[in-house]
Structure formats: structure tokens, C-alpha cells
Image (cartoon, rainbow, N blue to C red):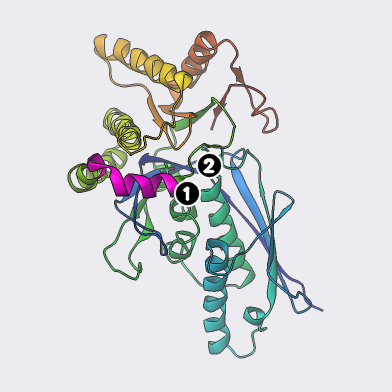
Amino acid sequence: MSLYQATASAPVNIACIKYWGKRDTKLILPTNSSLSVTLDQDHLRSTTTSRADPSFSEDKLWLNGKLDEIKPGGRLWTCISEMKRMRKEVEDQKPNEPKLSAMHVHICSHNNFPTAAGLASSASGFAALVSSLAALYKLPASPSTLSLIARQGSGSACRSLFGGFVAWEMGSSPDGSDSLAVEVAPRDHWPEIHALICVVSDDKKGTSSTSGMQRTVETSALLQHRIKHVVPERMRAISAAIKEKNFDAFARITMQDSNQFHAVALDTDPPIFYMNDVSRAIIALVTEYNRVSVEAGGKLKAAYTYDAGPNAVIYTPQENVKEIVDMVVKYFPQAQPFKDPFGLFKGAGVQGG
Ligand code: PMV
């Protein structure tokens, strides 16, 4: 008897131009395009195994060992149904293929870092889910095509289908068929850039991105300004900076966009606070580090960015990594630099990758 099973893994991505706001909540269509870097180290990944078997009586999914609910019409259900629909198209064209689309699936997913701690676990999770089903179903689909489906699980997940520097183009079609991820540059185009993850807290975040975005779209005037007058030019400028390997421009835009995303959260009614005092102290440290460099006639050396949580990600060229880790450890004496994934969240820490 054949075993129909496949495993895939996908890494976290961290946005430089933030996605915040949906124009269609069911299809997950964003109010602006966004751009991220997919981290290529092993510590922040989701790994997912999918199996189809005629004996299974329902679709089931375990996340980190716990059975999760697949609500009909919900995001998991939508992704699984869409993948089965694509498999069915293959089976219709090749009648000798096993009828996997008619079987239920069991899916087992594992994150090697805390779930929902502002470290984009839903991004890697849905990207790994879609990739493992694509492998199970042997679909001849490109990463951009798979990104259309991962997007319907969690918007930012569409960007984790590619490595390197990735844009999610918002698209304009009401059915979402042009709201997909595209590669801006592969990882090996600019391997010098590293991401340091400063884990300020691994608690579950207070306001989920879904409810936060909805409130922002409904109440923030600043968001309307951002999506019309700010993001389109930033997308163009940061793509050019990446292509030209211009770290100074890349860093400036990344920090400006993180600041504006958190300003938009604050402009929401009631306001949303994702950063805490430690997050703001890290901003002050990076700002001072850059100021010293610029005043000495140099350029920006590091860029901070924060998602929907207090943890900092610092982008920097390889040559500055050691200096920054030493600096963080000096000013935050409780911080522990670490290498192993399981020491990762014992306290404030700095992760290089
Ligand atoms: O995909 P979601 O619903 O987890 O939203 C992610 C939102 C941010 O992480 C704050 C920004 C981004 O572009 O990843």
C-alpha cells in the first residue's frame, strides 16, 4: 500500500514595509503592498507534515502537538480546500493519478519558537502548510501561485513562500488573483545583511493582528494617508535600495516604516501599543549607534523594525553584527546571546541569523 505523505518547512519573514489593514477580510486582500526579508537560519521555522489516507474520517491538524480546530469556512479550512481543489484539477487531467483530493488529510505542524509572540509564527506556519500540501499533491505550482493560497491563511504568510527579499503586491482585482508575493532579489544577492532578533518578551500578544487591523482601518485617518501617499513611494525606493545594495537607504526606509506602523497603531481608537519601554530603549540605542557613525562621516549601520509585539529585529551588514551584539549585552545586562534554539526564550536574548 502506498503512503501519501510529505514534509515541508518554511521560515519566518520580517517586514521592512509593513502590511497593516485589509480591504477584504475574507480573501485577505491588503490596503497596501508590503516587503520583507525571509530569514534563512534554522531557529525560526515551521515544519509541517501532511498525510492523505483513505481510512481518515476527517481532516485534522495538530499544532505543536495539540489538536487545532479546522472550522468550516475558516482560514485553515480555506487553505486545505483550495489545495484539494488544485489537486483535483491535476487528477482530472491525469486520470491515473491516485485520487488524493477525495481523501481526508492529517497535518502535523511544529514551530521551533513561541507561537504568536510577535515573531510571525502564522507566516511560517501557513507557508509550511501550503508547501507540504503542494508536495503531497505534487502540484506544478510556482511559489507565487502558492502565495495566493497562503495569503488566505495569514496575509504575511504569502511572503514566506520565497527566500530573500520579497514583495507582496496588493493587486487590484476584487477576486484577489493578483494579490501575490514576488521575489525582489534572492538571498544570495545580498548575503551580507543579517537579522538580529532581540526577544524582549515571548508572551502572547495583547491585540491580535486581525482585530488590530480591523480597528485601525475603521478609525485611523493616518492609515488612509499612509496607504495613499507613503507606501507606494517607499515600495519603489526600498526595492531600488535592495537592487543597488544601498544599506543606508534600506535602513532609513525600514526604520521610518516601522515608526509609521506603530504611529498608525497609536492613531487607532482605542489605541494599540505593541512596543514597550525595552523596545523603545533599543530604538534609542540603534539611533545613537547610527548617529555616531553619521557624525564621523559614515553611513547608517543598523535598522530596527518591530511587528505587532515588543521584540526588535535589527538588520545590519555582517561586519557590524559582533559590535551590535556586544552593545546590546552591555546596555541590557540581562540579555543573553544564544545559538541554540531551545535556550532562545529563557530571557531577553539576541539571535543572529
Ligand atoms: O499576517 P498577519 O495577520 O500576522 O499580519 C502581520 C502584520 C505585521 O507583522 C505587523 C506586518 C507584516 O507585514 O508582517
- Residue 216 in the magenta stretch? The answer is yes
Say if residue 139 shows up in the picture.
no
Left or right for 87, reference 172: right
Residue 300 tag number: none
- Which stretch appears magenta? 211-223
Three-letter amino acid code at disc 2? Answer: Asp
Mark 1 near mark 2, Cβ–Cβ under 8 Å?
yes
- Mark 2 or mark 1, which is nearer the start of the sequence? 2
Q: Is residue 4 above or below residue 212?
A: below
Category of crowding for the residue at label 1, using alpha-carbon neighbours closer than 10 angstroms: few (below 14), some (14–19), many (at least 20): many
- Residue 287 in the magenta stretch? The answer is no
Work out which quarter of the rendered image holds the N terminus and state it.
bottom right
Q: Residue at x 33, y 44 (%)?
A: 216
Q: Nearer the viewer, residue 90 or 88?
A: 88
Q: Residue at x 30, y 35 (%)?
A: 267
Q: Residue at x 62, y 79 (%)?
A: 101
Say if residue 77 shows up in the picture.
yes
Residue 59, picture quadrant: bottom right
Q: Secondary structure at mark 1?
A: loop
Q: Residue at x 31, y 32 (%)?
A: 263
Residue 40 tag number: 2
Q: Is residue 152 above or below residue 17?
A: below
Distance CA(mark 1)–CA(mark 2): 7 Å
Three-letter amino acid code at disc 1? Answer: Gly
Residue 102 location (% of width, % of height): 65, 82
Q: Main secondary structure of the magenta part?
A: helix
| Ligand 1's quadrant | top left
The residue wearing badge 1 is 163
Q: Secondary structure at mark 2?
A: loop
Q: Residue furthest bottom?
A: 95
Residue 174, picture quadrant: bottom left
